[in-house]
Every structure is written in structure tokens, then in C-alpha cells.
Amino acid sequence: MENTTLAHHLLLAGLLFVIGLTGVLVRRNLLVVYMCLELMLTAATLALVAFSRFNQTMDGAVFVFFIITVAAAEVAVGLALIVALFRQQKTVQSNELNTLCD
Amino acid sequence: MISLLSTIDVAFKALAPQRADWASILPEICVAGLALFCLIQAMVLPKSLRWLIPSTARTGIVLVLVMCLVSGTAWNPHEGTLTTFAGLLQISDVTVGFRATFLLCAFLTSLLATPFLEERKATITDYHHVLLVITAAFMLLAQSNHFVTLFVSLETAAVGLYILVGYLRLSGASLEAGVKYLVAGGLSSAFLLMGMVLVYGSLGAPGVDSLNFDQVASAIHAGKTTALTMTGIALILGGIAFKLGSFPFHAWIPDVYQGAPTPTTALLATASKAAGAFTLFLLVTGPFQPLDFRIAPLLAGLAVITLLVGNLGALASTDIKRTLALSGVSHAGFILAAITGILVSGQNGDYDRHLLSIYLLAYTVGTYLTAQALVFLPVAEDHRRPLLGLKGLLRRSPILTSALGFGISSLAGVPPSVGFFAKLLILILLAQAKLWWVFGVALLSVAISIHYYFAILREAVIRPSQESQEVQPISVPLSAQFIIGALIVITLLGGLLF
């Protein structure tokens, strides 16, 4: 543990964030896209905890609880929407969603 | 005993600046309480009395609005600001206008939603509950002075909006719009959060709460900014640009506005955009103020691109809701231009502090007048509203045509509507700030917008309908006629009294 620095944590968080972003942009399955969104939030949380630890301020660590709560609420609504959409359209592939157009 | 009391007194005085001033957020508490009261009513009232629920909600909103305005007029602008809840919230004369905007949006949305949902046999109580929760969250957002308050209230509102966009569970379009909004919104909140974390981390030091706006400002002022801070600020501005619906995060707007139930579309176009505008204003005049020489050119550039993208997109669209959605993007461009002007000119003018509230109130009135016409226009599917469907509207319903006419004129900025003066104030500000190229593009975009706005009116007023079936008059309930009349009066009076 002595050798891990802030830079290591930030690198990992940045990597997770980019993986999540790539997933959101590339994948077509809505569930996978949603998982990738959560991965991005988690990456931000990881960076927050690391900063909180290395800056020696507790505010960041407290913020994490709020983020987790908000993310849970978001998942509850998000999954409900995806399930309802699946019942209607029988698909969760984003490229097959084309009701809305000009 | 006396010494003990005096000790307690001293302790309280030491804590005084940290004390939570609950009275200052009484309006938010009342709105949230009203939201719960809607659910209680649904449990207690018999089915025959359920119609009371939206009426109680609206009465409550009006009372809170009066409370806000009364306490707001008592506010002396020279007194400065009130920072409370250990620096989480900051209340000033400007935030009173922000609160009033959100309450007005909630009131008008409730008026639209009640007949709309009744016609589609959807529950009205849940809609009002979520609407009131969103309103309370937006009102807190407009007063936040800390990144935690900002994030939590913004996300509370966002989760509520996901529900309201996908509210019609049996309509594929509504659900599709809900999911698209969910993914776009999730992406933007991830950007926003990452930005906050980077700002917090790069400016932090032991004993400094760098999530607090004042401390962020003083850290930036002390020259502690690094590349990491700038990345963080860019990510935050990107996340806010999504809420505002400005370039480069405007791609979701046409689809979501088209698929969402029309009352929700109106709410998204007004309250959600206003939330983005107010948050951006709070951030660039608060924590990021010391960097305004870098942010102002960036916002000016975004304003110009947003104005052009919105207007050119709206020109090409043939669906009414999509046209209005893309015109909303160009209004976001106007808002960005206004914020740039305020940043450059340094908030000197009398109107500058309240310019955003004035512009958004005018935009709100125009949008809801238009939405009233759309809600009562009978269509097979809510998400298919081609321009041709308006043919012969003048003969079918003069009242809806006048709602559409005044609403669209105000949105387009035709004198003497209130929308004209709102746009004029922004153009004057841009001229004073000597931002001539933004001024030029803003004028050009007004000219372009006249074309597509009046394409809508031309269908409604000039084109005669051929089929006899279409001449059937549309019946509009008396209450809606009254509201349309009131909004038209506000549009004209607001314009004439300026």
C-alpha cells in the first residue's frame, strides 16, 4: 500500500471512466449500455474517494453516500423503463428503436 | 446556573453562522409536503372525489408562489445574500425569480396534464406527485452553493423527469423517449460528476472543503488551477449543456420531446431548460468567476453554434413537436448568449441580474400557450403531429388558433409580445458588451426562426381544409379557455408594460 500514490488511483478511475464511455457509445444492448453508465459513475466515485483520502478532507467521502443513493434511485427507474419498453417492443437493442423520427 | 446558560449562549453564537435556517427553505418544504399530500389524498379519498387532487396541488402551488414573491419583495438586493445550511445553500434576490419560474412551470404543467391524462386513462395522482417532487428539487438546485446540493437536487429532478417522459406505459413512443432520455441523462450526469470530482480533488487541501462554491472560487483565485481543474470545469459545463439542451449535447432533444407526453414536453422545454440556465449562471458567476476570461469566449462560441444548429434543424423539420424542440435549442443559444453578455459586461445594468428570469418567464408563457393548443387538438397518436394536421384550425377552433398564434409570436419575438422584449434585452446586453459577432448571429437566427414559426401559423390560419370531417369544431373546456385567455393577456401586458 505504501507504494500506491494518488496517480495510480486516478489512472484506474480514468481507465474505468473511458471503458464505460466506450461501452455507452459502442454497444447496442440497452442493458449493457446502462451497466456502462453505472461503471462511469463508479469510476467517478473511486476518484472521489482517492482524492478525499490524499487531500485529507472528509467531504468527498461523505459525497460518496449521496452518489450511491442517487445511483440506486436512478437504476430503479431505469430498469423499470427498460423492462416496460421490452414488454412493448420485444427488444432492448437500441438500433431497433426507431418509432421517433421526422 | 447563569454561567452554564451563558456558556450555552456563547456556544450557540459560535455555531450561529452554521445554523440551519429552515424558514428560508419553507417554500421547498411546502412543495415537497404537497407532493406527499397528493399520495395521502389518493389513499383516503373515494374515487368520486379524486378530481380534488390536481386542484389541491394547483392551489398549493399558487400559495407557495405568493409566499415566495412576498418574501422576495421584502428582500433588499443591497443586503447581499444569505448563506445557510453550513454553506450548502445561498439565497438572494436573484434566486427568488428562479423559484418563481419553476413554480409557474409546475402550475401550468398541471393544467395541461389533467385533461391530457384523463383522455388517455392514465393516473393523474402519480403525475402530480412526481411533478411536485421535481419542482422542489429544481427550486433547491437554483439556490445551491455546494456541489453536493447541486448534484443531489439535479439528479432528483432528473430521475423524476425519466418517469414523466416514459409516463404513458402503453405507448411505445413514450417509453422509447424515456429510455433515450435515460441514457442521455445518465451520460451527462456521469460527466458532471467526474467534473465535480476533478475540481474537488485538484483544488483540495487539508481543511478546505473544495466542494463549496466560495472555497472553489477562492482556490481558483489563489491560482491553484491545474490542467486537471480545467478538465473538470469543461466536464461540468458539458453536463450542464445537456440540461440546457445546447450544442454539443442537444442530439437527444428532438426524439425525447417528440415521444414524451405533451405536458412533459412542455415541462422539459421550460423547467428543465431553466434549471440548466440557472445552474450555469450560478456556476460561472460563482465558483468559476475568476476564470471568466476563459469561459466567456467558450460560451460565446457555444451560443453561436447552438443558435445556428437549432434554427437550421428546425427549418428542416415537418413535425410540430420536433420543430418546437429544435427551436428550443436555439432558445438555449439565446440563454448562452445572455450569460456570456452578463459575464463580459459584469452585471452592471438594472435588468442584467434578472435577465435570465425575464427571458425564461417569457419563453415559458409562449411554450405553454403553444402546448395548450397541441393538447386539445385531437390526434391519433401524441407523437405524430405533422404540420398538415393543423389545416383549417382557425375554423375548427378560434380559441386554440389564438393560443397558437400568440404563443408562437411570443416565441418568435414579434412585437409587442413579451418574447420580443426579452429578446431585445438580450440583444441590448450583447451590444453593450460589444460582442458583435454573437449579436449578428442572434439577429440572423431571429430572422430564420420567423420562417419556421410562421410555417406553423400558415397551416393553421391560411390553408383551408378540404375534407368536411376536418371542419368539425373542437370543444375546449371553459377552464382551459380561461387559462389561454390569461396567458394571452400576460403575453401582451408583459410586452406593453416594459
Image: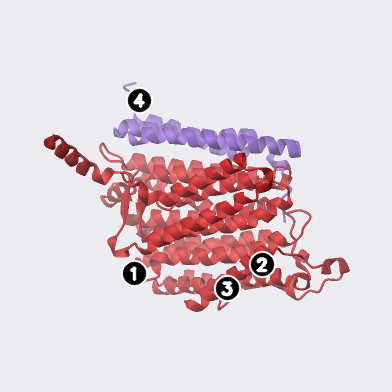
Q: Amino acid at mark 1?
A: Asn
Left or right position of B398 against B244: right
3 vs 1, front mark:
3
What color is chain B drawn in?
red
In the rendering, at what x and y percent does residue B252 appear? 61, 51
Closer to the chain start, of discs 2 and 1, is 1
C-alpha separation, residue under disc 3 versus residue under disc 4: 66 Å
Provide the residue designation for mark 4: A4
Q: Is residue B262 above or below residue B207?
A: below
In the rendering, at what x and y percent does residue A95 appear? 70, 42
Kindly identify the residue that appears in the image at 55 percent across and 78 percent down: B416
Front-lying residue, A20 or B370: B370
4 vs 1, front mark:
1
Q: Quadrant of the C terminus of chain A?
A: bottom right
On whether disc 3 and disc 4 are found on a single subunit, the reply is no
At mark 1, the secondary structure is: loop
On whether disc 3 and disc 2 are found on a single subunit, the reply is yes
- The chain displayed purple equals A
Provide the residue designation for mark 3: B489
- Which residue is at the far top? A1
Provide the residue designation for mark 2: B481
Left or right position of B187 against B14: right
Question: How crowded is the residue under tag 1: few (<14 C-alpha within 10 Å), some, or many (20+)?
Answer: few
In the rendering, at what x and y percent does residue B473 appear? 79, 68
Q: Amino acid at mark 3?
A: Val
On whether disc 4 and disc 1 are found on a single subunit, the reply is no
Asked whether residue B165 is in view, the answer is yes
At mark 4, the secondary structure is: loop
Which quadrant holds residue B114?
A: bottom right
Subunit under mark 4: A
Subunit under mark 3: B
